Image (cartoon, helix red, strand yellow):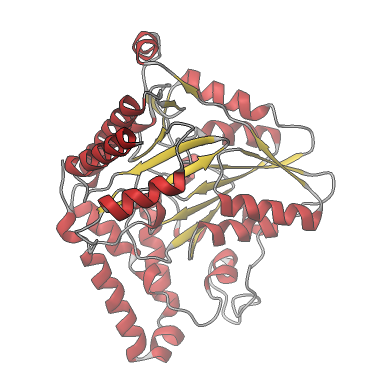
Amino acid sequence: MFNLRRYFLLDPSVTYLNHGSFGATPRPVLRAYQDWQRQLERQPVEFLGRRFRDLMSAARAALGDYLGTAADNLVYTTNVTESLNIVARSLDLGPGDEVLSTDHEYGALDRTWRFLSKERRFKYINQPISFTTETTENAEKNKKQRTKISVDSANSVVNSFSIQHFVDELWKGVTPRTRVIFLSHITSPTALLFPVEAVIRRARRAGIITVIDGAHAPGQIPLRLDDLDADFYGGNLHKWLCAPKGAGFLYARPEAQHLLKPLVVSWGYEAEIPGPSQFVDHHEWTGTRDIAAFLSVPAAIEFQQEHDWENVRRACRALAHEAQEQICALTQRPPISGFENGGTTGGSGLQMVAAPLPDSVDLAALKARLYDEYRIEVPLIAWNGRKLIRVSVQGYNTRQDVGKLVQALEELQSAA
């Protein structure tokens, strides 16, 4: 297992298994971030008045290379919530229209769509997407019957059966009034990788706009946006890419960019000196702000490249899978079976996993005891009547971190 803890400023007294919430920034990337801030403060007019466009263009080019798209298909935002608010508020939706989503979505974006649905009187639908749970005996039996795992062109680990199951369940909510499909690439509460490419292809044939929440994708899974071909895709860079807080992006397919309106109308609208992309003009310059987080994204990409991040991710995925297995063995709750790896468990395909907890658990009390008594930072989640623990594994984590969590859970369970 890689141990990159020395590169992070995390409190050594805390066992940190919650990278998925806010990420953590390595020291070299943080130094780059602070250097950009010093440059800004040294000559603000020079930095924001004369250098801004070239600096942002270079940062977008580096991000475009990393994400497999042209720089002019991207704009930097502070996070996915801002990115997808731009999209949701821009789309011409009204009475009689429907936006279809799932019941696994992130609360902030659910609230965005619900708010707008009340304002504009369209219907927002959270289609239930079931996952199965298996006993250890059945899991081993069924494992032999599953098709071989493959990687699609969006680099999502899926197989043909699980893709079809997901799309069929989602499509039960499609009607002639469905204008938009909104869903997560990797879900926040349940830590499942959805086969979004198959949904995008089918939606395109049906004339339905696709909006993808990629909060947990960049840096955790390979991502090629032009191959994925969603209409709109928002991503966070401060999570799994380990960029500074306040670094996110919005991707818009060239043919769909004209649908977007600026969330903040500023000098880029009716630009006096237009750039090559109206999409960039409208959304990049929103007035005075600190752009250091955006300019530090190339340093985050470089840090991961220098540290053989594909092997780091592979080791983290294996450790996350171990964590899920050990927690499920302890609680005697079968693992969540998802779509990302043929119906085994969530851990083999991602660095973030969720495991069920007993219904009798008091989540608030357990979370407080894990932190106060054991100094373990890990989220406990109430989702659709289920209680879950979500474990994130990043390059600074070790097997000892997982062992400490499992031991703490065992001790607290025995004392209950």
Picture mark count: 0
The residue under the point 56% across, 71% down is 281
Measured as percent of width and height from the top left, residue 111 is found at 64, 53
Quadrant occupied by the N terminus:
top left
Asked if residue 379 can be seen in this view, the reply is: no
Where is residue 222? Give x, y as percent: 36, 42
* Residue 200 percent location from the top left of the image: 58, 36
Question: Which residue is painted at 21% across and 38% down in the image?
Answer: 403
Residues 352 and 184: in front is 352
Q: Is residue 15 left or right of residue 128?
A: left
In this picture, is 59 found above or below 285?
Answer: above
Q: Residue furthest front?
A: 415
**Is residue 390 depicted above or below 299 in this figure?**
above
Residue 393 in sight: yes
Residue 180 position (above or below residue 266): above
* Residue at screen point 70% across, 38% down: 207
The quadrant of the picture occupied by the C terminus is: top left
Between residue 286 and residue 390, name the one nearer to us: 390
Residue 143 picture location, percent across and down: 36, 13
> Toward the viewer: 282 or 94?
94
**In front here: 240 or 234?**
240
Image quadrant where residue 175 sits: top right
Placement of 227 over or under 143, stated as above or below: below
